[in-house]
Image (spheres, rainbow, N blue to C red):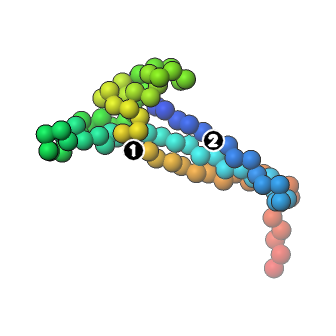
Amino acid sequence: MRKRQVVVRREEPSRSTTNSSYTIRSVRYVECQKNHAAGVGGYAVDGCREFMASGEDGTPAALTCAACGCHRSFHRREVETEVVCECSSPPSNET
């Protein structure tokens, strides 16, 4: 079973708008980009395709990848942003 680290952050709407909308950002950590051969002057990555936390959320082990042993910061970060609008009235069909 593959574990996936997903962080969802909800931003509250600004008070100056009349419509209720908020932004949902989901963060996903994918392939490892650590150069394991930097010490010998080369370049080689380990091929880890996705970050899998080695511990439960809130523990230091949650920041270590179970597949390659690297810190989460070595994995490429993908951020998906979605704006959700809860409008109080339907859009008008004026011609």
Q: Quadrant of residue 49?
A: top left
Residue 3 in sight here: no
Residue 66 x %, y %: 36, 24
Say left or right for 13 vs 54. right
Upstream in the sequence, badge 2 or badge 1? 2
Which residue corresponds to the image point at 76% horizontal and 52% vertical from the top-left? 13
Residue 24 x %, y %: 64, 46
Q: Quadrant of residue 75?
A: top left
Which residue corresponds to the image point at 18% horizontal and 38% vertical from the top-left? 39
Q: Is residue 32 above or below residue 79?
A: above
Say left or right for 65 vs 90. left
Residue 61 x %, y %: 44, 22
Choose between 20 and 53: the one closer to the eye.
53
Which residue corresponds to the image point at 58% horizontal and 51% vertical from the top-left? 81
Instruction: Kindly check if marks 2 and 1 are in contact, taking CB atoms under 8 A apart as contact.
Output: no
Choose between 23 and 15: the one closer to the eye.
15
Count neighbours of disc 2 (C-alpha within 10 A) and say few if under 14, some if 14 to 19, many if 20 or more: few
Q: Disc 1 on helix, strand or loop?
A: strand
Return the residue at label 1.
76
Q: Mark on residue 56?
A: none
Say left or right for 2 vs 7. left
Quarter of the picture holding the C terminus = bottom right
Three-letter residue code for mark 2: Arg
Which residue corresponds to the image point at 53% horizontal and 24% vertical from the top-left? 57
Residue 86 in sight here: yes
Count neighbours of disc 1 (C-alpha within 10 A) and say few if under 14, some if 14 to 19, many if 20 or more: some
Q: Is residue 16 above or below residue 27?
A: below
Q: Mark on residue 9?
A: 2
Question: Residue most toward the bottom?
Answer: 95
Three-letter residue code for mark 1: Arg
